Amino acid sequence: MKTGVKVYVVEFSDRPNFQLQWRDPVTQKLRTKTTAVRRTGLARDRKVAERLAGELESQLASGSAAFPSKFTWEQFKARYEAEVVPSLAKESANKIAVVFNHVASIICPVLLRDVNEARISHLAATIRSQGKAETTIQSYLAHLKAMLRWAVSQKILPACPSFPKIQRKKKSTGSTPMKGRPITLEEFERMLEKVADIVGRAAAAAWARYLRGLWASGLRLSESLELWWDREDRLIPIFPKKGRPMLRIPAELEKGHADRLLPIAPEFALFLLEIPEADRSGAVFKLPGIRGRTTELRSKWVGKVVSKIGAAAGVRVHTDPKSGRLKYASAHDLRRAFGERWAARIMPAQLRELMRHESIETTLRYYVGTNAERTADACWEAFQKSAGGAADAGMVELGFLGPAPNRSPNKGSQETQKPLSRP
């Protein structure tokens, strides 16, 4: 971008170094920058300052040192994508691309300074009107704030604008704040029975095995499709000669940008060991397409297939209170079922690591203390053991002590010794 700005070398009697001056073409304000070159009176030092003035003119012309008032949104986007995005995890990079698209289509900024308080508030309101959840809006604004703070650090934006506060919905103490729920074993088996109806008999075995893998592993859908036997740049299950099975996550796929070893649930380790060692190559889950497609499937498409299976099985996990729209079991509801099962077995800090949550707050909010009936049963059983024969007979007759009442498939505990049916 040609600025048409001339940079001059000037001298001030009260300053020991040569100064550079130019006029901002938009604000018409005079700007001054030191050269750190001493005013010694020698011609060679003056020439050094003049060379620096020429370099600054070139930088202004190319946009790499544009004025905050003149820096365009497209220039900022190009720099951020080139200098910041490559160092981020894949999921973060995808979210940033979504944020850039929203800003471009809703705010339509020409200059970087066009992204101000009023336009950001309009952005949040427009995204909300599109039906996005408050947590989603909060995530978008967090990424946008990080972008603008980086611009401030690079001195291409004078200050980061204020952002609107997102009022999160009040949490209900009677239910978990999930968009779905953990499904039961009985519901999961119903889903297995409907696999062939959705994907066809030829692909049914592979898809049923995929559902079993999600149920046993607690993997996110995207993680399950990144799971390979033999690729160092993907998630890999490791079975050491000494020690427990582990899941290795490479730095490229990890938010912390470091290779990590995380535990694998025992049932998932046994599930993986069903595959003979000679056949452990390529992707762990090889999913054929519904119409014979054999290329690598995208997570969004796989998620839709799993949801269709959940709908065919009639497994309802959520009803929108406003529209009444039903949501059927998805891949993430299988992960929720995994989390609820293990929440009854291990401590919260251990569950956080098993679920690969970034924050313990997520674990506590969604999986610890969310099943009141399960917690009540555990408390009464512990009290009964401690009371022994001295327990009040009247309380036993009332049913407060003794075996827990039978639970319906949709409300009961996930704990059961019934083995999974094989497709």
Image: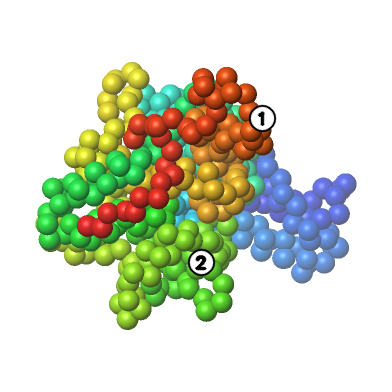
Please name the residue shown 35% across and 78% down the image: 277
Mark 1 nearby-residue class (10 Å; few <14, some 14–19, many ≥20): few
Distance of label 2 from label 1 (alpha carbons)? 47 Å
Q: Is residue 273 above or below residue 186?
A: below
Do we see residue 123 in this rendering? no
Please name the residue shown 42% across and 59% down the image: 267
Image spot of residue 64 (x, y percent): 55, 54
Left or right of residue 314: residue 231: right
Q: Nearer the viewer, residue 76 or 289?
A: 289
Asked if disc 2 and disc 1 are in contact, CB closer than 8 Å, the reply is: no
Indicate the quadrant containing the C terminus: top left, top right, bottom left or bottom right: bottom left
**Helix, strand or loop for disc 1:** helix
Q: Nearer the viewer, residue 17 or 240?
A: 240
Determine which residue is flagged by label 1. Answer: 390
Mark 2 nearby-residue class (10 Å; few <14, some 14–19, many ≥20): some
Q: Is residue 10 above or below residue 279?
A: above
Image spot of residue 307 (x, y percent): 26, 42
Name the mark nearer the viewer: 2 or 1: 1
- The disc placed on residue 246 is 2
Do we see residue 329 in this rendering? yes
Image spot of residue 54 (x, y percent): 61, 59
Left or right of residue 129: residue 96: right
Image spot of residue 223 (x, y percent): 40, 57
